[in-house]
Image (cartoon, rainbow, N blue to C red):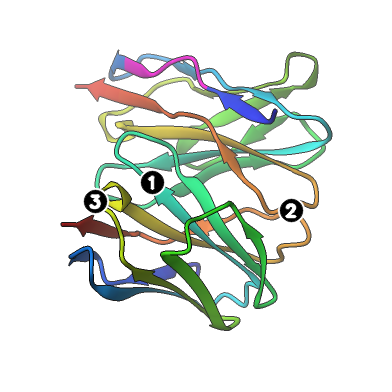
Amino acid sequence: DTEVTQTPKHLVMGMTNKKSLKCEQHMGHRAMYWYKQKAKKPPELMFVYSYEKLSINESVPSRFSPECPNSSLLNLHLHALQPEDSALYLCASSLDGSHSYEQYFGPGTRLTVT
Amino acid sequence: AQSVSQHNHHVILSEAASLELGCNYSYGGTVNLFWYVQYPGQHLQLLLKYFSGDPLVKGIKGFEAEFIKSKFSFNLRKPSVQWSDTAEYFCAVNGKNTDKLIFGTGTRLQVFP
């Protein structure tokens, strides 16, 4: 199983809402990532978790709050977002964050902030 | 600064034509190199990767890439494209022992029958 799953597929939220994105993998990977991808642009790294600890935060605004409850799950909690936060949010995982392995990507959650 | 450049933003080819997409990187140190593909409406998939060894690497679907260290390049090639190769192609690089994957701006490939 080389699959990373993400829910929901689509999300529309107002600027005062609180919502969460979920990512799951069952490949035994110990590193998980959140990326943001705007239309016709490359993915941009937001957060990295390695062995369930936050190892990289790319200066992401605090309205985005990641959480890694266990080695298979990664959440992204959203609160008080802005319309410019509308994008495709991608989750990825790799075998081990301390060494270099390829990342496997999920299908993404398309977020629209109204 | 670390960066990846893809000079071809949009490439249009007919089926059976040969393909070469350019990728150059700027990175201080030893790197791992990747090509990812994003088909319309689908998620990013790994086409091929280079970690070490033979600089000519073969990937899925008939793609290959050559790492030329002296030119800081990792160009993607396919001898004969198909309509189904229509997609966005991203070159990416990370340093050894680092999690941070840096993507190029992408090349949109359109293949016409």
Q: Is residue B43 above or below residue B9?
A: below
- From the top left corner, tell me how far across and down residue A51 is, in percent: 70, 76
Residue at mark 2 to residue at mark 1: CA–CA distance: 22 Å
- Callout 3 crowding tier (Cα within 10 Å): few <14, some 14–19, many ≥20: some
Secondary structure found at label 2: loop
- Start and end of the magenta stretch? B6-11
Q: Secondary structure at mark 1?
A: strand
The residue type indicated by label 3 comes to Pro
Task: Name the residue that disc number 3 marks.
Answer: A83
Disc 1 residue crowd, few under 14, some 14–19, many 20+, Cα 10 Å: some
Q: Nearer the viewer, mark 2 or mark 1?
A: 1
In the image, residue A97 lies at what x, y percent? Answer: 71, 62
In the rendered structure, are the residues bearing label 2 and label 3 in contact, judged by CB atoms less than 8 Å apart?
A: no
Q: In x, y percent, where is residue A10?
A: 21, 64
Q: Main secondary structure of the magenta part?
A: loop
User: Image quadrant of residue B84?
Assistant: top left
Q: Determine whether label 3 and label 1 are within 8 Å by CB.
A: no
- B28 versus B46 height, above or below: above
Q: Is residue B10 magenta?
A: yes
Residue A37 got which mark? 1
